[in-house]
Image (spheres, rainbow, N blue to C red):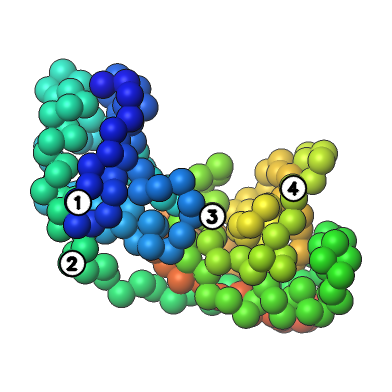
Amino acid sequence: MRKSNTSKLPGGDAQFRAASDQSLLVSFGQQITLESHRRVLKLLRLLQSKPIDEIRNLHPAYCSLLIKFDPLRLDHSELQSRLVPYLARLEHAPLPKPRQIEIPVCYGGEFGPDLDDVAAMHGIAPTQAILLHSSPIYIVCFLGFAPGFAYLGGLPKALASPRLETPRAKVPQGSVGIGGNQTAVYPFATPGGWRLIGRTPMAMFRRNQRPMNLLQIGDRVRFRPISEEEFAESSSR
């Protein structure tokens, strides 16, 4: 099953595509929307609550769910058929109440070296850029790139900015960046090409805690501006 096909069900059109000989990609359109992501989350929760034995792993993204399965026990067509009852339940499937997480951020200065450039790019003052970034409630759409790196949906269009032409060799831990129409927090020091507008003292990746990732799929996130003094105080705890 190498070609895509679409299933028209009450939960919305679902497109199936064989991503490999042991994985199936279930997509809900090509546009990143809250509704398409809700369908991904609903299918994920349904498969977690009533597992299909032959499924090995589930990997959610913005508008798709990658399903890895045992190819010795199941093929793509059989898996697709077994997914139909789950997809038919999407319309009325409940989602658990999302966690609300507030992340303190010190914007600009040495913590956000690209804030002024982002503001100038959009013809606004840095203070307005901070207000725009800290006002929305974001949703954790998926985890990737690095452990604890959560891609957040909901960035205002007025802040959408292209990645740097030349990525930095090292982005400090806790840096808050903008890449295209997304925003995220770097969980630890790593190379990166997003435009840095601030930094948080809050740990995104905790090696000695379970779960290790602070942010989980479906969480709601709001950024709270703090001063350099508050940042220093929080970092010393």
Tell me the CA gap for discs 3 and 4: 14 Å
Q: Which residue is mark 1?
A: 9
What is the spatial separation of the Cα atoms under label 1 and label 3, in whole angstroms?
Answer: 28 Å
Number of other residues with Cα within 10 Å of mark 4, as a class: few under 14, some 14 to 19, many 20 or more: some
Q: Earlier in the sequence, mark 1 or mark 3?
A: 1
Would you name the residue on which mark 2 appears?
92
Quadrant location of residue 181? bottom right
Depth order, front residue of 173/63? 63
As shown in the figure, which amino acid type bears the numbered disc 3?
A: Tyr
Residue that appears at 11% across and 48% down: 85
Quarter that holds the C terminus: bottom right
Residue drawn 13% across the image and 36% down it? 81
- Identify the residue under disc 3: 151
Instruction: Give me the C-alpha separation between circle 4 and circle 2.
Output: 39 Å
Percent of width and height locating residue 57: 28, 38
| Residue 138: % across, % down | 52, 69
Identity of the residue drawn at 15% across and 53% down: 88
Earlier in the chain: of badge 3 and badge 4, it is: 3
Q: Which label belongs to residue 163? A: 4
- Point out which mark residue 23 bears: none
Task: Inspect the image, locate mark 2, and give the three-letter code of the amino acid beneath it.
Answer: His
Of marks 4 and 2, which one's residue comes earlier in the chain? 2
- 223 with respect to 225 (left or right): left
For discs 4 and 1, the disc positioned in front in the rendered view? 1
